[in-house]
Amino acid sequence: MHELIREMRALSQSALQYTKDPYDRERFERLIEISNALYAELSDVDLAGVEKFFFPETGYATPKVDLRACIFRGEEVLLVRERSDGLWTLPGGWADQNESPVRGYYVR
């Protein structure tokens, strides 16, 4: 159940980052209120404590885990240019909520 609540909250938080429609904004804010209430119901923390815990979280919801892939072809390695600073890096990005990175995956 906690996983579903966490996902509902993360999807709503991310949607609030991008929506411009006031009707949608109201709905996504209500989903966050519902997720807070469900967390409070399933834990020993009251609603005010849950809201205080999540208060600073805004913007696109991620677990703040960066995933990268190292891709080789012979002695070459694939690099991509970051939009944020123009520097070269391994391809990747933020993990989404409830996603687990797969480590050590190797294909020949």
Image (cartoon, rainbow, N blue to C red):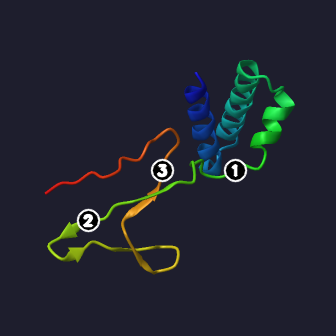
> Of the residues under marks 3 and 1, which one precedes in the sequence?
1
Foreground: 27 or 92?
92
Label 3 to label 2: alpha-carbon separation: 18 Å
- Residue type at mark 1 is Thr
* In the depicted structure, whether residue 101 falls above or below residue 89: above
The residue under the point 22% across, 68% down is: 72
Examine the image and state in which quarter residue 79 appears. bottom left
> Of the residues under marks 3 and 2, which one precedes in the sequence?
2
Where residue 106 appears, x then y in whole percent? 22, 54
Judging by the rendered image, the residue that carries numbered circle 1 is: 58
Res 71 label:
2
- Residue type at mark 3 is Ala
Task: Determine the secondary structure under disc 1.
Answer: loop
- Residue type at mark 2 is Ile
* In the depicted structure, whether residue 5 falls above or below residue 88: above
The residue under the point 65% across, 52% down is: 59
Res 95 label:
3
> Of the residues under marks 2 and 1, which one precedes in the sequence?
1
